Image (cartoon, rainbow, N blue to C red):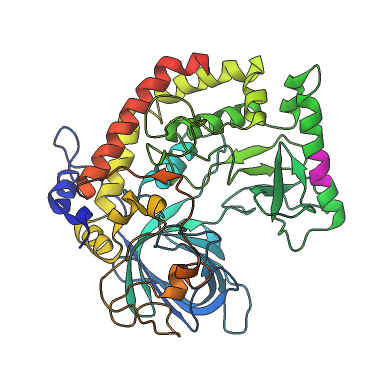
Amino acid sequence: MSALVGRVTTFVALLAVGACGTKVTPPPELGAIDLTCRLPLVDGPKVECALEVREHAGRVLYEDHAMVDRLEGSSSPFVKPSYEMELRDLVGANLSANFFGMGADGDWVLDGFESDRSMMRSALIYDSFRAVGGGRYAPEGRYCTLSLNGVDQGLYRLVEKIKRDDDRVDIAADDGSGTSFVVESSNADDGALPNGLGMKWEFVSPSDASVTHRQRDGLESWLTAIDDTLASATPADVFKHIDRDALADWILIEELAKNLHGFSRGVYFSRDAGRPARLVPWDIDLSFGQPTITDDVAIPPNDSPEGWIPERPDFIHELVAIPELHARLAARWRAFRGGPWSDAAISRRLDDFSVTLDPAAVINNFEIWDAAAHDTAAEDGAAGDGATDADTDADPEAGVDADAGAPAPDAGSPDGDASDAGPPKPTQSFYPVADYADEVAKLRAFITARLAWIDAHVDAY
């Protein structure tokens, strides 16, 4: 049994009342998701699965099918995978569903929290970013339990996939010119991908598989205009291409989280034709004090609430050197600290998450997924034994241990055989925790110290 199981019941029960002892409106209860899949779930191709989504009280929100695979790069070197789902019917037609009031769509992510033992980091940042208003978008989500082929998989968060949609990134459909889009930074070794800001970029909306040469040229033209403007005598003209205040807000939310790869991986731009582009936060697991970088002396430790994000690409340096943006960073930080990013507002969000993540569900999750493995996973090249010490012979049709619910070898590693992969280069470690209450306490303490440090240093960013 995981060390994180201890003292959960008392910890969460204390959060059912406000700081002054007054009752608060109950946050949403856990949803429930059942997946029954014909084949093991791997990192592509997608597998046809029967899908049922229910409210806590049992009302069925969806009962049909979905095409599902593991989220690309999910869970390496960690055990618990995340998944992508595309809603379909039995004949393959696209479907759409409004899950828990998040708006109807057919594309969803099941976030397994990867390295986030609190299960709160991404949700906190997404909710805090939307709370600033001004049309800022970050994915909405809902905590759920997940059953895969009848085997309990613990806690997940059903999250919107970033894409163009009236209820998500609300921009016009592209007219074929490549001037209205959602794009994501890419680590793919593909020379054909558009290049700019020192990164390669893939289309999200329209889909990368469907874009035309003209649309790629339109994106290339926008990226080239940004690079050329930053290198010119009038770099402030870059804000004709990137929304200045939206950029400031994105930088600040990434710095609030001290998101290790916030500026270098999973960077999303959205652009409505004829308007400056905005950014969308994504993937906040490696943040708020974890992990510690242990093998690169050029990168300061990430576990301290002090200091800025260590990995800062050249384009971030170039942008924040522009006086018009630099001044807005401090002004907007102070405005948000008086409202949606105040200590009290952030604490209330964490309180709400802690009530939704009820004690029994948290205990159950860490009995299935031994999060103590995170302490040494990256250093040892193994993420621990996952759910159990039981026999790991897999049901090939289920993709999970038929007896105990532990990940099968083909579900627990991207290539289906973790033993052949060899230990990764040691790069990061995670602070040890006594139990779940200790993890959440450490997260809260880091956030409090981080907010105070940025308050004192934002003028010098």
Residue 221 is one of the magenta-drawn residues: yes
Q: Nearer the viewer, residue 216 or 197?
A: 197
x, y percentage for residue 55? 35, 66
Magenta span dominant secondary structure = helix
In this rendering, position of residue 305 left or right of residue 134: left
Q: Residue at x 53, y 42 (%)?
A: 281
Write the residue at 50% across / 14% down. Answer: 459
Q: Position of residue 195 (x, y in %)?
A: 76, 44
- Tell which of 420 and 205 is nearer to you: 420
Total marks drawn? 0
Residue 177 visible in the snapshot? no
Magenta region, residue range: 218-222
Residue 356 lies, in percent from the top left, at 28, 53
Depicted 423 relative to depicted 278: above or below: below
In the rendered view, tell whether residue 125 sits above or below residue 31. Answer: above
Residue 14, position as x, y percentages in the image: 15, 44
Q: Is residue 81 magenta?
A: no
Quadrant where the N terminus sits is bottom left
Is residue 373 in view from this perspective? yes
Q: Quadrant of residue 409?
A: bottom left
Q: Residue at x 74, y 63 (%)?
A: 209
